[in-house]
Each structure stands twice: as structure tokens, then as C-alpha cells.
Image (spheres, rainbow, N blue to C red):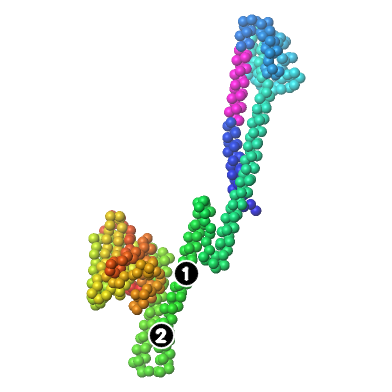
Amino acid sequence: MRSSATNFALAYILLGIAALALFAAPLWYAWHVTIQEGRIEILQADAQRLADIFRREGSSGLTAFISRRLEAQLAGERILLLTDEHYRPLAGNLDAWPRAAPAGAGTYTFDVNVDGHITSAVFVRETLPGGYNLLVGRDLARLAPLEHRFWYALANAVGFLSIMGAIGGILIRRAMLVRIHGIRQTVSAIIQGDLSQRLTTHRSGDELNTLSQTLNGMLDQIEQLIHGVRNVSNAIAHDLRTPLAELRSRLEELTLTKPSSEQTFAELESAVADVDRVIRLFNALLRLAEIDSGLRRSGFVSLDMTLVAADAVEFYQPAAEIKGRTLSLASDGPAPIRGDPVLLAQALGNLIDNALKYTPEGGWIQVEVRRPADQSVIVSVADSGPGIPDTEKPKVVERFYRGDVSRGTPGVGLGLSLVDAVARLHGSTLELEDNRPGLCARIVLQSEAPQLMHAALAPDSQTVLEHEPALP
């Protein structure tokens, strides 16, 4: 079974051979055509020169010239033959007129017997005045050594490319196996439960390094989710234990003491309150799970965030007046966005509810909706309460987290978790800053196009807070 590295090496070898063939084919064709045409042009020039000598000096002069030339040339350099009108040889290095020679003048290729050897040659035939015949030719085998060297060099190149490709494949395979072995060891340790293991990364920036970094990011997220699930499970068990224990104690006391009807109904009302508390807890968790899954994106519509904020302020205004806090709204006009009006109203309600819990009597809470020049909508809730320490700001969005300030207040620590989840669902994050004094919670939402501003209405937002109370 071949490895990926071996397949890559074979593919590179075949690609190199194909590239070499594509380079050699036109080179061979150009060589062949150039040599053939050059050979014919030289033969035609020689034939024309010999014909001129025949016209000036006659057959005797041409015979003498051919004899002198054959004595001076290298063996087999030229094939020359001059015959009379009856094809009787007068001069040349052929014993007789070739039978394969065509009758008319022109350029031909055929086999002849030269010095007792049959060889293929290209000829130019000329018919001279008086019926004399002239053959001027050249052996095609004279350039065969060059052709052999060409093919030999090409074969050596293919062999060298194959050897280097095989060596490269072996080296690549070893390098990949080392990296894959490290990945396999890390993954095996993670499978066995050690979630702290991470893939080794290098500074090379290659594909495997990029893959390792991506997998490490995924492992970080998985570890965070698992720890979150573990913490949530522990928190749920802790928060359910108290109301369930109280519920059991009340019911057990009723069965043992059998009090009067009025006292029994009072205890039953307390038991129902404990059950409602448990139900609210599970409803909050289910809502967070629905937000995290992204299913609520299907409910996105065009809405005016200023109207949603105005409804939230109006809803909480009586509670603020009863507690002696000042609750106000500031905006610079309509703020069209696209989102889920129910979730946005729930998130804004949670921020206002938290501000009312921790702002002292006589303090103030201000809700702002602004549209800066960068086509965004900023929704913020600022108060004059004690604020949140910098060390706790990253933790307060965790589910069931309760800071030191909130220990004595009712709730289970899911309010800001829902606000953060709603912000992430809308492509934003929950930002917590010091208000000096107090806290400023801010969400930056993407503004909708101006042409959709008049369509940005949220009719459901007027009643949403009545059906979606703030999370504890």
C-alpha cells in the first residue's frame, strides 16, 4: 500500500517526464526539419554549381571537376554521379545509375550502394543539356550519431529525474511520517482523556503546520466546551439541590405534622415557588442552548433598536421608581438593524434588571442607542452602581458565575451569559467597561441599509418583555 508521499513523488516524476517530453518533442521536430531543409538547400546549391560548370566547360570539364572534388572530400561526404544520355557513368563514386532513381528532375530519397554498402541518401537530380544526368546526394546516416546522442541525453535525463524523484519521495515520506507520528501520538493521548495535549507546530508555515494550528484551535475550543459543560453540570447540581431540598423538607414536614388547611396551603405555595425556580432555571438553559445552536437566526427581521430600547425602559420604569432609581433613554433617532426582536429585548432587559439590582437608592441608569459614522448601532446600559472588578469582567459572562458582589442577591448567574450569547448570535460581543462609578455594558450591532430604515419595525417588541422576563 503506497503512502501519500510515495504517490506525490510518483506524480512529480511523471509530471517531470511529461514536461521533458513536451520540451524534447518540439526540439526534435525543429532539429529534424532544420537539418532536412538545410541538407536539401546545400544539395540544390551544389547541383546548380555543377550545372553551371557543365554549361561553361562541357561534360569533360564537369567530369574533371567531379573527380578532383571526390579526391579532396572525406569518404562518403558527397555522393556524386554524372552519366551520358544512356546512363553510362562518366564520373562519380557510384558504379551505376541507381534503379530507384526517378526519371524526372527533383529531390528524392532512396537507397543506393556506396562502396559495397547499402545506404539511404537524399538526392537532387538534374537533367543537363544533351541528355546528360547528374545526381548530387548525401548519406542520411552521417548525422545519425548526433541523433543517437540526443536520445541518449534524453534517456539520461529521464533516468536522473526518476532517481532524484525516488530519493525525494523517500525523504518526503520520512518527513511526513515523522509529523504524522507526532499527530497520531497526540490524538491518541487526547482519546485516552488527556485534553491538555496539543499538536506540535513549527515556524515553517507549511500545510501540516497550518493544519496543526487549526486542530489546536479546535482542541482548545473542545476543551473549553467540555470544561464548560462540567462546570455547568456542577452548577446545576448545586443550584438544584437547595430548592429541591427545601421542597422535600416542606413536603416531609406536611406528612409528619399534618397541619391545618391554611398552613398546608401556605406550605404548598412555597413548594410551588421552589418548583417554579427550578423550571425557570431549566428554561434559561434551554434558551441558551437554542441561541448557541444558531436556530434563532431564522427569526431575524428588520427592526428599530431605538423602539426596542424604549419599550424596555418603559417596562422597567415602574420598578425603577419603586426602588428610587432614575431610568432614562438617550438616542439620536431611529436605529435600523436586522435581528431577533425577542432576544434583543430579553438581552436589554437583563442588562437593565442587573443595573436595578446593584445600583444603590438614588442612583441612575441610562440606556443609550447611538449610530456612529461607521454604519453600526451601539446599545449600552450604564449605571452608577459598584461596577465589576477588572479581574471578574471576563468571568461574569460564564454560566452560573456569581461574583462577590452578587452573592447576597437572588439569581443563579445566567443573565449576562444570555446577553453575551445574544450578542454573539448577532455577530457582536458584550463589552463591559468601567463607568466611574458604575458599569457600562455595550453591544455593537451592524446597522441595516438606509433604504430599509422605514421597514425596520418590530411590532412584537412592545409586548415581548411581558412574556420574556429577565433571566436570574
Q: Quadrant of residue 111?
A: top right
**Magenta stretch containing residue 245, yes or no?**
no
The numbered dot on residue 201 is none
Q: For the magenta stretch, what is the residue range?
A: 28-48
- Name the quadrant of the C terminus: bottom left
Q: Which amino acid, by three-letter code, is at mark 1?
A: His
Nearer to the camera, 90 or 310: 310
Residue on which the image places disc 1: 227
| Majority SS type along the magenta span | helix
Label 2 residue SS:
helix
Choose the circle earlier in sequence order: 1 or 2: 1
For image coordinates 41% across by 85% down, the residue present is: 246
**Is 96 displayed left or right of 172 in the figure?**
right
Q: With respect to residue 471, does 49 lie above or below? A: above
**Is 406 displayed left or right of 314 in the figure?**
right
Q: Which amino acid, by three-letter code, is at mark 2?
A: Glu
Q: Quadrant of residue 399?
A: bottom left
Residue on which the image places disc 2: 246
How far across and how far down the image is residue 309, in percent? 27, 66
For image coordinates 67% across by 12% down, the residue present is: 69
User: Viewer-nearest of labels 1 and 2?
Assistant: 1
